[in-house]
Each structure stands twice: as C-alpha cells, then as structure tokens.
Image (cartoon, rainbow, N blue to C red):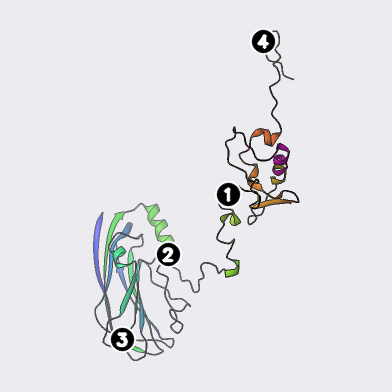
Amino acid sequence: MVVHEIRETLEIKKIELDDNGFGIIQKRINLRPNMRHNILQLDIFQDAVPSTTGPVLMMELFVSPYPIIYSEMNLTPTLTSRGQMAGSDTILMKAIAHKFQPNEFFTLDQFPSQQIGASPSFSFYTPALYVTGFVHGSPADVIENIAFSFYVATESKKASLVSYGLGVLRERSVAQGINLMQQGRTILPANNVGQIFPMWKYGGARPERMLRGNALADFFLPYASTDSEKMLNTTNIRGYLLRSRTMQPFDNAFGSLDPAKGQIPDWLRFGLNRGLVAGPIRAQQPPRKLADNGNTLMF
C-alpha cells in the first residue's frame, strides 16, 4: 500500500459571474490507475479574504473523483445552481463558505467534519481528484482574490481489474448530473398516526398478541406448542382460527370482522397446538394390525 499526501490550492485572481450570479473554478489532480484509493485525511484552509462588487458572496467547495455538475436547485432562495449534496457517494469532501464580510474570513462548514476528516473515511477507484469551487453572488459580480488550500492523504492499494472497472463505472454513473432531486416524503400531521408507529401498519413487527384491547380475556398468550392454555373454550378458539385464515392487505393488521368476536388478526393461526388447528387429537392411536410375517397392515 502506498500513501500519497496531496497538497493543492485553488487560487484565482479574478472571476466574473454570469447573468445568474454563478461561476466555477476547478482543478484536476491525476492519480495512479488500477488502484483503490482510501481517504485517510482531508482538510481545507482559507488563505485570503476575497472581495466582491456585489452585496452577497457564498462558495461551495468540493473534492471529488469526477467534475461537479451544477443543478437547477437553489443554494438559498436567491442563489441558484447549487452543486451535489455532501451525502452523494462521489463527494469526498464538501465545504460551504458563508457569512461573508469585507476584510473578514468566511465561516467554513465542511462535511465530513474536521474530526471525521482526520481519520480514514471514503474510498474510490477513479484515478483522478477534482477540486471545485462554485461561486455564488449577484449577476455580473466580479470576485477577486479567491484562495483556498486543500490537504488530501490517500492510501492506494492495487485492485483487480474487475473491481477496478466496476468501481470506475459506478462512480461515473453516480457522478452524472441530477438537475432536480426530491428524497423522502411529506406526512400530514393529522395522518402521522399509523404511518410511522405502530409498525404493523406496514408489515413490520406485530404488537402484543391481542385480539381486542377492551376485553381482558381476549389475549392470545405465546405459550409453547405443548403447553395448555386457559383462555376461551375450544369452540370459540376454533372460531377465531377459522376467521383468521384470510390474507390481509399490507396496511391492515386485523382480519375479517366477526359480529361477536370482533376483528380476527391473521397471525393468530401461527404457533398453535395441533389439536386446535386440526381438531381434537384422539386419545390413543389405532391399534396396529400385523400380518403373520410381522409386517404392519395398511388400511
């Protein structure tokens, strides 16, 4: 295994933003091919205080195996074209430089944090690193004196051609631009009950083995299959079992509705004594009938 310590700078004297108040600075770092690179340490440092002709200035800073493709999503309500999420698989480090004030350094928030970035974290196969800066401001702003330093320590290990090829293909696929993304779902507060808990609404773990909460006798206790159980009489239990043999929708834990017994859960038929499921067990097996040669006769 080979450890590479990379020191790189992203430094530019002047950049003019476009009509949307957006600009890109980028640098490529070549690495050895056919290797699996594991990030040991990452760090970022601001070397100079920039100036701007506009009222606002923010920057997104990335370290990634592929170039960052900007999206149609907003960084703030007024700043557009933000880059990929820090949680994206191909983002090795992302920092947000914000709270710009003249003659003052940015406030830097980075992912992974400095504590995590000082220990081994992500791995990748692509034989390149891109250091990218997205500059956000007002339309046609002129930004001067941008200077950041990056430290990246990687541990490189020879990879098989199969794993190397698949790794590069996957990273290239993930790095493709996503113009618009929406993850997760919204839940109306009034509908929250039953969507998260209890989990049986979506086929998860069942609650207590209970038929009805308003009748203390209507419990199905998890006795062993050979233990006796005092609950209801045999006829009533078999009635429960008969009504439980119905496949239920994924969001409905309880089975068919019986006027007398209520709703019968489908799980009631599991782990039952054989006598309850198949009928009463005979007191003794039929006597064996043997032929003259000692073979058991079959009827």
Q: Secondary structure at mark 4?
A: loop
Mark 3–mark 1 Cα distance, whole angstroms, equals 59 Å
Which residue is the site of mark 2?
A: 172
Q: Bin the neighbour count of mark 4 within 10 Å (Cα to Cα): few under 14, some 14-19, many 20 and up.
A: few
Q: Bin the neighbour count of mark 3 within 10 Å (Cα to Cα): few under 14, some 14-19, many 20 and up.
A: some
Q: Which residue is situated farthest in the bottom direction here?
A: 53
Q: Is residue 229 left or right of residue 140?
A: right
Instruction: Name the front one of labels 4 and 1.
Output: 1
Q: Bin the neighbour count of mark 1 within 10 Å (Cα to Cα): few under 14, some 14-19, many 20 and up.
A: few
Q: Is residue 217 left or right of residue 34?
A: right
Find residue 91 and report its horizontal and vertical position in percent: 38, 67
Whether residue 142 appears in magenta in the rendering, the answer is: no
Which residue is the site of mark 4?
A: 294
Circle number at residue 27: none
- Which of the pair 29/226 is nearer the observer? 226
Which residue is the site of mark 1?
A: 208
Amino acid type, residue under disc 4 in the picture:
Gly
Please tell me which residue is depicted at 33% across the width and 57% down the height of the picture.
36
Whether residue 238 appears in magenta in the rendering, the answer is: yes
Please tell me which residue is depicted at 46% across the width and 82% down the height of the picture.
77
Relative to 131, say whether 288 is above or below.
above
User: Residues in magenta?
Assistant: 225-240
Instruction: Name the front one of labels 1 and 2.
Output: 1
